[in-house]
């Protein structure tokens, strides 16, 4: 993807760069590209691994007791549904964070590119204030995303506790009524941890994937831009010219033009410029 992005940047029209800051383009090739790699790498692998572990736990629970397994799955689905409520808000605040990263890159590029002018015209206070404003804005956006992530984790922990104590309460009633044995309850509660982690982690993984896709979206915006067509073509080699093309060019020359060029050099004439004449024409180099 990095190669595709660099190749696309080299083929984009100049008007695309005219309306964008160089720092924004730099941010898309660094921070946003890193987020895209995370979205297409670990954030896709982790949900798959969690899903495989959870499915194995559900099979083991069904072999122990179908009724308790259904209760555990029902509580897990509720926990997953609660986690998915955070997907849209986290995607929105993640987009804002990535845009803030781009603004900081823009201000950094301005500071580095105009360092001489800033010192010359004593604009250090003004330039620093602009940079600090961009950093503070990024900090506020990052804290807003952290609050949403903290809320999501809190909901996941509460749902996990509900599943654990819910299974204990329902299993205790089953033991008292004689429809369930203590070893079966103990096995279901132990295995339910993997099922609970599956539902909880799937919701969190989807939210984290949305956060990484916020950077990937900015990369795909560049990849979806229309490339500028290459104008012009290389001159054909002499061997590729149509038959008779060379002769037709020679025929268009004035009469005697082709024969005058060879006659310009008489037989035995030297093409070297005398040393004194060369110095007069070219000028003496320093130190000669």
Image (cartoon, rainbow, N blue to C red):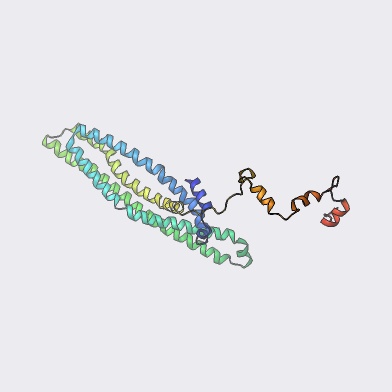
Q: Residue furthest right?
A: 276
Left or right: 92 in relation to 253: left
Q: Position of residue 161 (x, y in %)?
A: 26, 45
Reply above or below: 196 against 126. above
Front-most of residues 211 and 174: 211
Which residue is found at the position 17% from the left and 41% from the top? 170
Q: Residue furthest bottom?
A: 121
Q: Position of residue 214 (x, y in %)?
A: 40, 52
Which residue is found at the position 44% from the left and 57% from the top? 99
Q: Position of residue 144 (x, y in %)?
A: 38, 57
Which residue is found at the position 78% from the left and 52% from the top? 260
Front-most of residues 45 and 72: 45
Which residue is found at the position 35% from the left and 49% from the top? 207
Front-most of residues 193 and 59: 59
Q: Quadrant of residue 138?
A: bottom left
Left or right: 64 in relation to 121: left
């Amino acid at each position: 993807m990095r190669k595709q992005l660099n190749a696309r940047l080299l083929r984009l029209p100049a008007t695309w760069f005219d309306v964008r800051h160089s720092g924004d383009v730099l941010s898309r090739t660094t921070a946003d590209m890193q987020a895209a790699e995370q979205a297409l790498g670990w954030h896709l692998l982790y949900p798959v691994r969690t899903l495989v572990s959870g499915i194995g736990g559900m099979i083991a629970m069904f072999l122990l007791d179908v009724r308790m397994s259904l209760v555990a799955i029902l509580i897990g689905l509720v926990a997953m549904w609660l986690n998915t409520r955070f997907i849209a808000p986290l995607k929105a605040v993640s987009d804002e964070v990535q845009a803030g990263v781009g603004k900081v890159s823009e201000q950094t590029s301005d500071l580095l590119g105009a360092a001489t002018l800033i010192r010359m015209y004593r604009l250090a206070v003004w330039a620093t204030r602009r940079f600090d404003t961009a950093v503070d804005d990024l900090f506020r956006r990052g804290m807003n995303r952290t609050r949403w992530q903290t809320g999501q984790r809190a909901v996941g922990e509460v749902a996990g506790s509900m599943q654990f104590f819910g299974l204990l309460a329902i299993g205790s009633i089953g033991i008292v009524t004689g429809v369930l044995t203590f070893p079966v309850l103990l096995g279901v509660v132990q295995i339910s941890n993997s099922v609970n982690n599956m539902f909880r982690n799937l919701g969190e993984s989807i939210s984290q994937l949305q956060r990484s896709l916020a950077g990937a979206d900015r990369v795909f915006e560049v990849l979806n831009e229309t490339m500028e067509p290459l104008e012009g073509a290389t001159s054909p080699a002499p061997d590729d010219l149509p038959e008779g093309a060379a002769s037709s060019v020679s025929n268009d020359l004035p009469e005697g033009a082709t024969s005058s060029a060879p006659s310009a050099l008489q037989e035995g004439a030297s093409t070297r410029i005398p040393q004194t004449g060369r110095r007069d024409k070219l000028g003496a180099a320093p130190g000669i």
